[in-house]
Amino acid sequence: MMTRQEVKSVVENLTGVYQLIVYLMYGCGLRMSEALKLRVKDIDFGFDKVYIWDSKSLKDREFS
């Protein structure tokens, strides 16, 4: 398990799309496959939610 400082160090060394993917994975606890399957319509900016459909556990999830 990585400490918060180690995660911060990794994220600071990334840029662009890669940094965004790591932020989502860390902040929402997403698996790599879930993060890569995200589409714009899965993010609800009005209610600040991210929806995960058809995850590995076969349950739909949402994060605030």
Image (cartoon, rainbow, N blue to C red):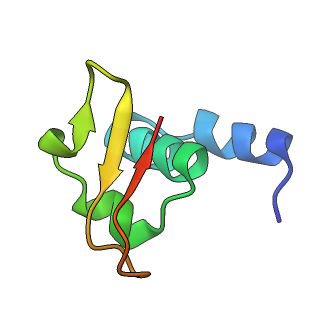
**Image position of 54 with respect to 16: above or below:** below
Name the residue at the top extreme: 46
**Image position of 46 with respect to 44: above or below:** above
Where is residue 15? Give x, y as percent.
43, 35
Q: Residue at x 53, y 48 (%)?
A: 28
Q: Residue at x 47, y 45 (%)?
A: 24
**Image position of 16 with respect to 7: above or below:** above
Where is residue 17? Give x, y as percent.
32, 41
Q: Residue at x 27, y 23 (%)?
A: 45
**Image position of 37 with respect to 40: above or below:** below
Q: Residue at x 58, y 43 (%)?
A: 27
Where is residue 57? Give x, y as percent.
44, 81
Q: Nearer the viewer, residue 18 or 56?
A: 56
Q: Quadrant of residue 56?
A: bottom left
Where is residue 30? Give x, y as percent.
49, 60
Name the residue at the left extreme: 41
Q: Quadrant of residue 20?
A: top left
Q: Quadrant of residue 54?
A: bottom left
Left or right for 43, reference 12: left
Q: How many labels were placed on the picture?
A: 0
Quarter of the image that includes the N terminus = bottom right
